[in-house]
Amino acid sequence: MNVNRRDFLKKSGIAAAAAFAASQGVKVTRAQDMQTYYMVSFLSGISYWADAFRGMQDAAEYLGVEAVYTGTPEYDITGEVRVLEETLGLQPDGVLLTVIQADALQPTIDNAIGSGIPLVTFDADSPLSNRYSFLGTGNYSAGVTAARYIGGLADGGKAAVVTVPSQNNLAQRTQGFIDTINAEYPNIETGDQFIVDNQNTSEQAASGLSALLQAEPDIRAVFSSNAQAAIGAASALREAGLVDTVHHIGFDFDEGTLDLIDNGQLGATLAQGTWQMGFWGMMFTYMVRNSMIESVSDWMAAGISPLPPNVDTGVVVINQSNSQFWRAT
Amino acid sequence: MASESVKKVSAQKNNMARPLINFLTQLVKVREFALVAMIILIAVGLELYTGRFFTTVNLNAISLGFSTSAVIVFGMTMALVSGGFDLSVGSVFALGGVVTASALRADIPIPLAILAGLSVGLLAGLTNGLLITKVKINPFITTLGMMGIARGASLAVTKGTTLAGLPPEFFVYGQNKTFDLFNLIIIAFFIIIVGDVLMRRASAFRQIYYVGGNEEAARLSGINIDRVKIAVYTMSGIFAALAGILSVSRFTVADPGAGTGEELRIIAACIIGGCSLQGGRGTVIGGLFGLIFVGLINNGMILLRVPVYWQQLSMGIVLLLAVGFDTLSQRWQLRPRVRQSS
Amino acid sequence: MTSLLTASNITKQFPGTLALDNVQLDLQAGEIHAVIGENGAGKSTLMKILAGVISADSGQIHLNGEPINPTTPGEALALGIATVHQELSLIPTLTVAENIFPGRLPTNRFGMVRYGELFKRAQSILSKLNVAVDPRASVEKLSIANQQLVEIAKAISSDCKILILDEPTSALTDHEADQLLAFLKRLAQDGVSIVYISHKLKEIFMTANRVTILRDGKFVGTHQVSEIKPDDVIRMMVGRELGNIYPDKGKETGVTLLEVQDLRLPETRVSNSFHLLEGEILGFAGLIGSGRSELAHALFGAAPKLSGTIRLHGQEVHIHSPKQAIKLGIGYLTEDRKQAGLFLEMSLKQNVSATVLNKVSQAGFVKPERERQLAREYVQRLSVSTSSIEQEVRRLSGGNQQKILLSKWLAIQPRILIVDEPTRGIDVGAKKEIHHLLRSLCEKGVGVIIISSELPEILGMCDRVLVMHEGAIIAEYSGREATEENIIRSASNH
């Protein structure tokens, strides 16, 4: 799970999301011999998946196949299992799946693989299943990227991290950041004592960072590991008059973070490779479906996956110099 | 609170210290006294220990931290005093912000956009009030349902993303200062003070206390219970939406996930500030003190460099200690007298 | 016959009232012993002392010659004294069987309840009682009468030697009451002694062996039922000096203030008509549950009416809410001071102003000085003893609480004031003050309706008395005609 906002989305059913999903999932009458590939998600209405599906569509167009988007509109584990089973019932040529809960979906994933349907997971994995491949953000290395961005700008002082310590993916980002700063930038001081818990809200990020800035006046850098943290921390820096003194990098992007970057209230943010997940997931399943990969003579018989089991789709630093490329894609 | 001595107090004692002692005894009896005393103690303690507490920046940061919540406190105090509560404030908070932001993005003038956000809050609150009074669903289920509906509606309006690209003039409320004081803080204090005065003095608001104190007695006293409750929940909805709008103005983006868990934080603050879950008791200013208290503990834990992994635990312990102490001291003050001479 | 239980010199003081003053009770083995007296005579207090609910300030209780002093209901039960209180003590959501054996559920060695056994035991007790109630049914689904029977089943399930019943038939129909009384007789034959509190003389003369009469917390006498007549009992119950606790009767103006015609309440078959004159005190007498308060609620707009017309000074009015009633100058002082009358946690001042917020407000804001002035005025006028008008009402004594409740209604300057049990549970001094106050209202032309279960109050206060029985006004007496005897006879439809 790389999208923090899902934590609150869990709690509610989303009416419009259903409509969105329906509009995306309407099946176009397909030509007799045209292959159809499905993307299956949960919380299918949120725009985070739109970028991944755009990538899948781009690849599908290039390959001359059809891409269909479906999923369960709610944060509903059995709902996603059901949608996946229904999708498999349509005899798809391939499936790109983001996993709501690793164990719950494993049997269904293994069934699909057993019946010869190429299936890859993206963004969130079911690592013990037989899926061909997982394409997602390496959270630790994303933290490393953030650290190197900060290290390149700040020469000294202390670095704070605004995050949710109890959330595993965010904890990995934090760890990557702290390890790298300590290893590569010894003049910058950071560590557990500089972590602020933003409890997934902008308000807590702002209050927490404000207090830490009081306790530690030498803070010169901030890494916000989720979008709410970035927005709240940016406010805290603005309200303390420290926008120009403290270097700040966030995580994920949306219109709000891009605006903050453009008006100078946020130095940079990290964009996940969601488009990449969709594009290369499509490519992977197409290649398996159409037997285009022969890593060994008969990988199916040998039980050897022809695809790389884990693909880090990486992060990209967005700052004022390149922010316009993420707008209105 | 002045003592209204109806019965002649024995006038023989012409001890000069008497008025002072009387004043102090009365002061201790004021419900918020213990809380204010604790707040002052913590603040002074933090200043002595860190030397960084009483700085403009820190005080601003703390005040900004509770400002939007303070706006909700007024509505929640009304709901609690009426004998119910409103679990939907966190979601209505998000919805108000999201609706105003959407309106702004559609180039609707700022006042109208704010009005749109407030109207949605009004609608949510009115629905709560009607369901509670006319359909007689209990406040817990009603507002829990509204919590889901309002959250769902915010997600529907935004398709799950944050809304940005709002006109900079809109940020005046949440970011600018007037006479070196953040507008947001001024607005919050204004609402708290007005709310507190209304609850204490306005006859319409007094009815809320009667309803929460004894619903049947209020009904027999000619108070329209349903109308009072509908008004209470409607206002709670409006103020939650207003807080959400102010939050958007502060953070520049409308987040459909904003305010998650806010309802419990606000209820906790109000209870700490003297509201009773049974209704009939509580002041707006008390709720503000509750917020300040919680905010101070959060702030203090970071100033005292409590490790992040221990902060939630410490917070829980401090809260229980504070409320426990307060409850015990209240019970001690309110001990029933053994016999009432007549 | 020998004495099983004797209580002697029992004295109990409550704040403001001496509830029991040197009272005695002698209970013999296997007898049904009725205890009778007016409301406030101390019957329930005496029973509560025997049941261990409260303890006496002084006095001795002996069981089989041994001194006992039960301080909790559990201790009393262990001594073989079981009690059925007036207020039901069942847990509505649990089954009948679970209610009969609370804390004594049969369990297996893992501590799990053996429900089969439980239901069997419950069934056998219910059969003994001749009660057709399924032990598996949940109590909330039962009628009040059946709940009462379950309550009795619960009491006798403990194999008690002494069973105390506080008005067990007040919620029962005649038929149900007869069955219960027959059962009590059988129980007595089996050797259980029964103490039986009742207002219903007829029942007492049908069932009891002996009767003890209490009056104003004092012991009047114990008699064999076979040796006395009902009229003797009534005389012993009421025979007291009314003194000047009641003011002189007033002179009516003869002007009709209120006229109620064919007023019918939902779920009743009868309709009632009556009128009230200016300056008159009209009494509503009857047993508890005879429909007096319900009628008052309907008149006051606090409960729905099915049909009927109400005229005020000859003009028809429609009252659908207390608010409208108040606007028309009608006040209703509830019988349930704590549950429906006062805002206990709020100040005395705020209680007084509850009905007249608009009068103490200006431009929508309560004027603190006006509100205090109002409270002070009534505190003085009714001589409420309190240290401050900011005092929480729950800290006042019952009499002072009642005065505050009354103030709330005086504040609206009523044309008609309905008072429901206006002096219940308050001391004689406050009683007298309230009575005089009500009369002084009448002298200013206010019409007062008194609903009271205390006959002396009805007789001492009222210019005219209506008697209700099962929802209907069945008798009317002028102040001169009304006597305790004829009211009691009418009230029990004798």
Image (spheres, coloured by chain):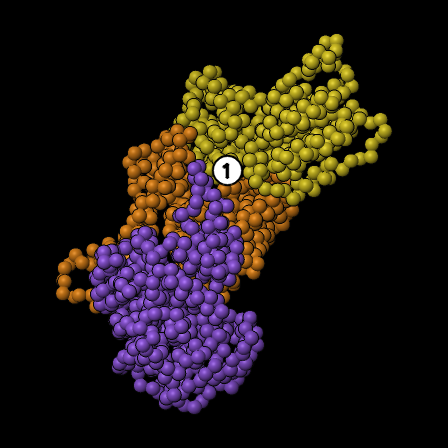
Chain colours: A yellow, B orange, C purple
Above or below, B150 against C437 in this view is above
At 54% from the left and 77% from the top, the residue drawn is C270
User: In which quarter of the view is residue C87 placed?
Assistant: bottom left
Q: Label 1 sits on what residue type?
A: Ser
Tell me if A192 is positioned left or right of B172 in this view: left
Q: Quadrant of the N terminus of chain C?
A: bottom left
Which chain is home to disc 1? A
Q: Residues within 10 Å of mark 1 (few under 14, many from 20)?
A: many
Picture quadrant of residue A99? top right
Q: Residue at x 27, y 65 (%)?
A: C26
Q: Is residue C403 visible?
A: no
Q: Nearer the viewer, residue C81 or A9?
A: C81
Q: Residue C165's quadrant in the figure?
A: bottom left
User: Is A223 in front, or is C335?
Assistant: C335
Left or right side of A73 for C73: left
Q: Residue lying furthest top in this view?
A: A297
Task: Name the spot of residue A219 as percent of width and height, x first.
Answer: 42, 28
* Element at label 1: helix
Residue bearing mark 1: A202
Residue C433, given in percent of the width and then of the height, sits at 29, 76
